Image (cartoon, rainbow, N blue to C red):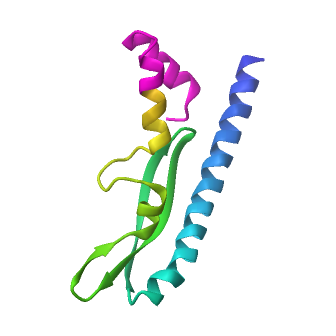
Amino acid sequence: MIKREKAIAFFFLNLIRELMSLALERADQELSESMKNQGYQIEKKNQRSINMAFGEATYVRRRYVKAGQESRYPLDKFMGFDKYKHYSVLAVRNIPAVSSVAAYRNTALAVNCLSGF
């Protein structure tokens, strides 16, 4: 029974990750119009992975450039993803919340059992 429930949980975590990836790509597409209206042009598309509360989501995002300004990834700013960090704000918040009431070993166990990463 436990094996079956783990398999079901794994299936749904993967489904959520896939849906989140699609949602992020859709949000990036919707931000595209506003960036173009501000005079930015798409320089390239990059793939990025980020660990969220339910696991790692991989998505493609657009990088924009404008003469005289730094290039930018509006999706990352919109979602609050830091430039060189690979964890979402919620994932980062959840770990200290658990660790404030549990020992390090128990925190690691809780994170491994309850999150998708």
Q: Residue drawn at (46%, 87%), measured in percent from left and top?
A: 36
Above or below — where is 17 with respect to 79? Answer: above
Q: How many marks?
A: 0
**Front one among 107 and 4:** 107
Residue 14 point in image, percent of width and height = 63, 45
Task: State the predominant SS element of the stretch in magenta.
Answer: helix
Residue at 52% over, 51% down: 57
Q: Residue at 47%, 89% (x, y): give it.
A: 37
Q: Position of residue 33 (x, y in %)?
A: 53, 84
31 left or right of 18 in image: left
Q: Is residue 10 magenta?
A: no
* Quadrant of image for the N terminus: top right
Q: Give 49 or 6, whichever is nearer the viewer.
A: 49
The answer to which quarter of the image holds residue 3 is: top right
Looking at this rendering, what residue extends furthest in the front direction? 38
Residue 55 x, y percent position in the rendering: 53, 41
**Residue 100 belongs to the span the image colors magenta:** yes
- List the single residue furthest toward the right: 1
Q: Relative to the observer, which residue lies in front, 98 or 45?
A: 98
Position of residue 3 in the picture relative to residue 54 (left or right): right
- Residue 14, compared with residue 107, is above or below; it is below
Residue 79 image offset from top left, x and y in percent: 48, 57
Magenta range? 96-117
Left or right, 58 with reference to 96: right
Name the residue rendered at 50%, 82% in the picture: 34
Q: Is residue 105 above or below residue 46?
A: above
Q: Identify whether 92 is placed above or below 111.
A: below
